[in-house]
Amino acid sequence: MRASAFWRRLQAAPWTARDSAARRGFWSALFALALAAVFASVALTSQVSLRAGQAAPTTIVAPHDFVDQPDTQSARAAAAARVTPVYRIDSGLLQQSLAGFDSALAAVNGARQATGLTAAERQSALSAQLPPGIPVDDQTAVLTTDAETLAAAAAAARADLNAALQAGVRPSELGSARASLTAKVQRLSNPAAVDDFFARLVSDTLVADDLEDTAATAQAEAAAANAVSPIVIVTGQVIVRQGDVVTAKDLTLLRAAGLLREASTWTLALGALAASAVIWGLAWAFLRLHDREVLLRERAMVLFGMIILVSVALERALLPLSPYLVPAGAGTILFAVAFGGSTAVLAAALLAAAAAVLTHSASVGVSVLAGGLVAAFSAGTLHQRRDLVRAGLYAGVAAAGTAAALALLYGGASAEGQQLGSDALSAAVSGVLAGVLAVGCLTYIEDIFGILTPVRLLELGNPNQPLLRRLVVEAPGTYHHSLMVGNLAEAAVQAVGGNALLVRIGALYHDVGKLKRPYFFIENQLGGSNPHDHLSPNLSALVIISHAKDGVELAREAHLPQEIIDFIRTHHGTQLVSYFYERARSGSDGAEISESNFRYPGPLPTTVEQAALMLADGVEAAVRAARTPSSGEIESIVRRLVKDRLDTGQLDRAPITLRDVDTIAGTFVRMLQGAYHARIEYPEQVVQEFRPARRRAGA
């Protein structure tokens, strides 16, 4: 069934609204609900509703890799607990301890050197400057012993104190360190009371100077914890077995895997509708600003929604195999072919967002986005259908590279060789599937939706197409004229920013109606007799005018797209066949001649491309009729003909400005001057000089 027939039947169905706006609203609501159903199906079919202490109704396995956070945190905490605290000697406390010893020794020497005091007064003065608890007898001993013995005992005790401090005394070891130091000093070879004095003094002044560096310890603990690789639940690993009592840890794992349904069905449905509304809302907003025609044309809008919906549904169907096996590039390629590059970029973003929603993975979404963007860029330069496969391959490479890069970036089991290779391979396969699916779907899209894609246009331009082959054989002059018109119109449309490929292909077919009576048109007469010499002006005009109607009939029989048929219908607009009109007037003997019998029925051109083709058709025929015009004559012919089309209102319905018309005319002049340039006539003497050289060369 052809596109037009399909849509006529659809619009005539009893359940279909007659108003186009109402139908577009219906399609929008239908697509939103369908996409929400796809989103909701992921949760409904994959999630379970469980609580701690309940027996698992079935064995549940991991649908994808994810980190076992409880076990990972436990392992990291254990690794941090095994870290030995970092201690550092506090030099300030060391010096403070030695200063306390030196201060007490200075007090002893001061009391020994004091004059005018009794022994009891010296001892009392010394006791006030010493740490409490030193026996009076020991104080008396250091006051009465000889200076040499005191100095030796003090030096030895201080050296032992310094050694203990340099070795480091931790707070937990302070008691044992004091006992050890006391015993060591008491064994010095001095009077026992003197050694006891200094033993008690070093014990009192010794402090814990080897303290824990909490910052360094915390850093070491963090390093030890980070060195523990995440414990990963791999795809297919059992999370909970059927009949096992579900624990709090099991619920945590199910939640991390996205398998635990914690919301009600209504909440889930609302979430799916919200996600669908966001995606469609962004799409409609973009189209309203940048491609409003898609929203206004029912077929285009339905095609847009169908591609999105089918692509997401296909992603959903392939999800159990691999989250990266999502051939979203197929939808992007089809968007690029059917709607253009900017809309394809929008599709890539929308399909990536849908993939992230389906897989609960931003990494998958970024991978799909990369592949989709590459597909959109690659599909922008299509010459044949196999180029769609090439675009899909490029998309697969981009998606695979992105998946691998993200896996390496974020680490974990997905960065290990086997899983990394699996994800990258799935992404690459998705690109191959995208290209194949795009090729397979394109023909149906062209037929059902009547979308004229660049690929279809290129196929229509193949000289082996039946109508073009007939032109070559049956009307070669018309075919050559069509080629020239196509070149002129293509260059002109390129200059003003239209669809150059469309107008070139339209030009090839614009005169196919001449196949009905090719020799009634001067370009096919090849110098023979002119059949119009034997016809009345009215009949000749009827034959000439009918080639547009005949062309429409032939085009429809050949199932040419409507866009091409429109070129056939409009390329003469409502112009007057002035030659035969004037012949009729001159032979009418004053009788009134109806001008309407000598005018094309129209319609007028309604696009820039149709207007450019009308002008190119006229100027090519006019310049060709001038035989060997000069450059100035060519410009004069072009400007005069373009002005005539403007003055007679042939361009009134085309969205074209006077500046565009001037640009088109200038393009025609440059191209025609190049095609019909004057050739140099060489003097006879120069020709004679060339002849011997040609004979020597064997010419």
Image (cartoon, rainbow, N blue to C red):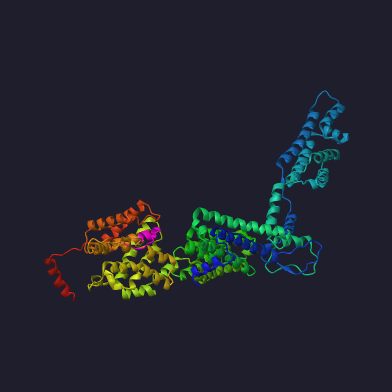
Examine the rendered structure and indicate whether residue 317 appears above or below residue 96.
Answer: below
In the displayed structure image, the side of residue 475 where residue 154 appears, left or right: right
Magenta range is 599-613
At a point 86% along the width and 33% down the height, the residue shown is: 140
- Is residue 405 visible in the rendered structure shown here? no
Examine the rendered structure and indicate whether residue 149 appears above or below residue 625.
Answer: above
Examine the rendered structure and indicate whether residue 89 appears above or below residue 62.
Answer: above
Asked which quadrant contains residue 208, the reply is: top right
Examine the rendered structure and indicate whether residue 465 appears above or below residue 601.
Answer: below
Magenta-drawn stretch contains 611:
yes
Magenta-drawn stretch contains 446:
no
Asked which quadrant contains residue 124, the reply is: top right
In the displayed structure image, the side of residue 571 where residue 425 appears, left or right: right
At a point 70% along the width and 64% down the height, the residue shown is: 44
Instruction: Name the main secondary structure of what is drawn in magenta.
Output: loop
> Which residue occupies the foreground of this view, 587 or 57?
587
User: Which residue is most to the left?
Assistant: 685
> Which residue occupies the foreground of this view, 187 or 431?
431
Q: Provide residue 486's location: percent of width, then percent of height.
A: 34, 64
> Which residue occupies the foreground of this view, 532 or 663?
532
Q: Provide residue 447's location: percent of width, then percent of height.
A: 49, 70
> Which residue occupies the foreground of this view, 361 or 187?
361
- Is residue 235 visible in the rendered structure shown here? yes
User: Which residue is most to the top?
Assistant: 116
The image quadrant where one finds the C terminus is bottom left
Q: Provide residue 284's location: percent of width, then percent of height.
A: 55, 56
In the displayed structure image, the side of residue 59 where residue 291 appears, left or right: left
Q: Provide residue 245's location: percent of width, then percent of height.
A: 81, 65
Number of marks in the image? 0
In the displayed structure image, the side of residue 687 where residue 119 appears, left or right: right
Asked which quadrant contains residue 66, the reply is: bottom right
